[in-house]
Amino acid sequence: MAINITHLSRERNLLFIFIIFSLTALPVYSAELSLEEALQQEVPIEEITITGPRTLANARRQIERAEDIQFDLFNDLVEDNEFMIVCQKITQTGSFITERDCEPRFMKTARREDGQASSPSIRRTILGPSHYVYVVDNKSNRELNDQEAAKFDQLDQLMIELGSENEALGNAILEAHRLRAVLKEITREQFWEKRSRN
């Protein structure tokens, strides 16, 4: 049935168009349901996005999850176990605060070998009749990083190569990088916010 709406008034045209579009936007209902019942039916929501203040703790948790995904994918793909990345929670001496520490196995091996190499060279220095100080000549983290610089370069190359070959790993690398940029932005925002209050 065709309706000629050109002879109706402007207000009636708008009302008619509104009713037509309103009816098409209603959820589909069966012949057994009345219009009121169909309007009262719940429509499932596919996604809800809640926006709130961004916190450093939340950003760090998101980075940790993204890195877990990235490192798990990388470890599944890498053939040399020395390049596998291992994460653990550590507590620094004299502190109760745990930190996340992720490093490749070759770094853990270098740290262990450095500790074993310096064990025989423990020197005992006498400070008094019953006080001793043990001096261990271990390398610092910076010295170990410098020692293993070539392997870190290989690790970077391997991560890039595997990330370009494997789409999931490539996306995980990009997501972790994006989240680190977000953390940097939040840190900057909070710094300037605190500074403007003072």
Image (tube, grey):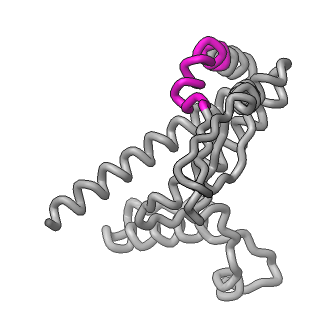
Farthest-out residue, front: 129
Q: Is residue 147 magenta?
A: yes
Q: Does residue 164 appear in the picture of this structure?
A: no
Give the residue drawn at x 81%, y 22%.
78
Image coordinates of residue 85 in percent, x first then y, are: 73, 33
Quarter holding the N terminus?
bottom right
Relative to 16, say whether 174 is above or below.
above
Q: Which residues make up the magenta segment? A: 137-155
Is 153 situated left or right of 75 in this image? left
Q: Main secondary structure of the magenta part?
A: helix
Residue 108: quarter of image: top right
Give the residue drawn at x 31%, y 49%.
188
Is 31 situated left or right of 51 in this image? right
Give the residue drawn at x 68%, y 53%.
89
Give the residue drawn at x 60%, y 31%.
137
Q: Is residue 22 magenta?
A: no
Quarter holding the C terminus?
bottom left
